[in-house]
Amino acid sequence: MKQFLANTLTASADGSIDITMVALVCVIALVVLTTLVLIISRYRKCPSDKILVIYGKIGKGKDGNARSAKCIHGGAAFIVPVFQAFEYMDLTPISLSVDLRNALSRQNIRVDVPSRFTVGISTEPGVMQNAAERLLGLKLDAIKQIAEDIIFGQMRLIIATMDIEEINTDRDKFLEAVSGNVETELKKIGLRLINVNVTDITDESGYIVALGKEAAAKAINDAKISVAEADRGGAIGSAEADRDMRVNVSRSNSEAIKGENEAKAQIAESDAIRREREAESLKRATAAENIQAALAMEESYGAQKNAEMERASLEKAKLEADVIVKTEVEKRKMELEAEAEAEQMRRRAQGEADAIYAKMEAEARGVEEILKKQAAGFAEIVKSAGGDADAALKLLIADKLEDLMRVQVDAIKNIKIDKVTVWDNGQSADGKNATANFLSGMMKSVPPLQEVFGMAGMQLPEILGKNIPEKTSTEQE
C-alpha cells in the first residue's frame, strides 16, 4: 500500500495524474472504513442488569450437541453478521401477588393464603440457558402468568401435606417448604425465587380463629397464675421482713433493758411491769403475723382455684370446638357431594334431551325433504301432462299398477295350506261346483282396488275401469 501511494504521488508530481488509480484508492478506503464500522457495530456489550442472548449458528456444547443459544452476563461478544442475532433479557425483579383461595389442607379444611413472591431471571449457567430457551421474546405479563401458575400449583401441593397448626404456627417450616418446591419448578423455566412473604392465613370454618382464642385464653390464665404467685410471695416476704424487724428490735430492747436493770437495780419493779407489757405486745404481734400469713395463703389458694377452674373451662371449650368443627366439615362435605350429584344428573338429563331433540329434528328434516322432493316430482309430472292433474294421476297409477297387483297377490302368496280336502257334491245353483266356489272365495278375500281406494276417500280413474251397475232380477231373467 505504501509503495502504491508513493507511485501515485510520484505520478502526480510528474503531472500525469491517473484518475482510475485515484478512484480505486477511494473505493478501497471506503470498503476498509465500512468493514471497520460493521465490526464495531456488531460488537455488543452486556449491561449488569441484563443477559445477552446470542442465537443462530452458535456451535456445539461440551456434550457434543448443538447449542440453541449462548448466554452472557457481564461481558461482551462479537455478533457474526447473517449467521447470528441477539436479544437482551431483563434481570429486574418481578413482584407477584399470589392470593391463594380455598386450598385444601391435610385436615380437609380449606384455607386462604395471601402471599407475595419476588422472582427474577436467574444468572446461573444452566438455569440461564433455560430462560433463554423458554422466556426469550415473551412479554412481562406472559412471564408473570407462567410464574403464577407454577406458584399456585406448588402452594396447593404443599398445603395439602400440612395441618392447619403447622401452617399457622410453624411459619418457618411452611416458608421453607414453599421456597424449596417453588424454586425447583421455577428453575425449569429459567427463573429464581428472591423472596416470599406470607400475610395473614384464614380459613372458612374459623378453625384458626379458634386456635388464636385458645392461645389468648391460655396466656391470660398463665398471667393470672403468675400474678397470684407474685402476690403470695410478696405477702410472705413482707411478713418475714416484719417478723425479722420485730425480732431484732426486741433483741435490742432486751439487751438495753438488761443493761439498765444491771445498772439500776432500784427500778426492778418498774422493769417487771414493762416486761409484762412487752410480753403482751409480743403476743399480739405474733398473733397478727399468723393471721396475716393465713390470709395470704387463703388468697393464694383462692387464686389457684380460680386458675384451675379457668383451665377446665378452656379444655371444655376446646373439646366443643373440635366437635363443632368436625361436624361442620362433614356437613359441608355432604352438601358438596349432593350438589355435585345433582349437577351430574342435570347435565346427563340435558344431554339426553338434546340428543332426542337432535334425532327428532333430523328425522323431521328428512321427512320434510322427502315430501318436498315428492311434491317437486309430482309438479314435474303435472307439467309433463300439460297441466292436467287428472292425467298426471293416471300416469302415476299406471306406473304403480304392477306394484298394486303384486301387493294383492302377495296377500295370499304366503298362506301355507298343507292339505285341502274338498267334498264335491256336484254343481250348485249358479252352475259352479264346490271346488270352483272355494277358489273363487279365496281370491275374493283379497281387498279389491275399488274398495281400498274408497276407504281412503278416493275413486279410481276411469282408465282402470268403470263400475258396472248391478242387474236387477228382471234383467237377469
Image (cartoon, rainbow, N blue to C red):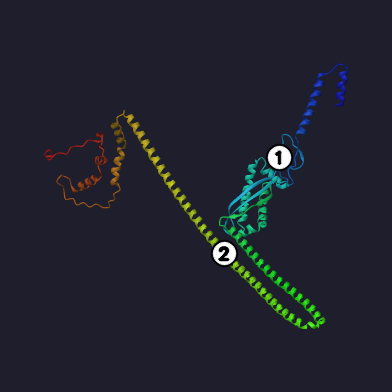
Distance from disc 2 to disc 1, alpha carbons, whole Å, reads 61 Å
Q: Label 1 belongs to which residue?
A: 88
Residue appearing at x 63%, y 46% in the figure: 146
Q: In which quarter of the image is the N terminus?
A: top right
- 136 or 459, which is in the foreground? 136
**Position of residue 234 measured from the top left corner of the image (x, y, whole percent):** 70, 69
Whether residue 354 is visible to the viewer of this picture, yes or no, is: yes
x and y percentages locating residue 40 in the rendered image: 77, 33
Q: What residue type is labelled 2?
A: Ala
Q: Residues within 10 Å of mark 1 (few under 14, many from 20)?
A: some
The mark that comes first in sequence, 2 or 1, is 1
The mark lying in front, picked from 2 and 1, is: 2
> Residue 304: x and y, percent?
63, 70
Q: Considering only vertical position in the picture, is 98 above or below 139?
A: below
Asked which quadrant contains residue 107, the reply is bottom right
Tell me if I can see residue 163 in this picture. Answer: no
Residue 113 marker: none
Q: Name the residue under label 2.
A: 317
Answer above or below: position of 246 versus 319. Answer: below
For the point 52% across and 61% down, the residue is: 327
Disc 1, SS: strand
Is residue 19 positioned above or below 123 on the image? above
- Judge by depth and name the residue closer to the eye, 299 or 355: 299
Q: Position of residue 45 (x, y in %)?
A: 76, 38
Residue type, mark 1 in image: Tyr
**Is 385 on the left-hand or right-hand side of 163?**
left
Q: Quadrant of the C terminus?
A: top left
* Viewer-proximal residue among 310 and 423: 310
Residue that sits furthest to the front in the current view: 266
Q: Does dot 2 land on a helix, a strand or a loop? A: helix
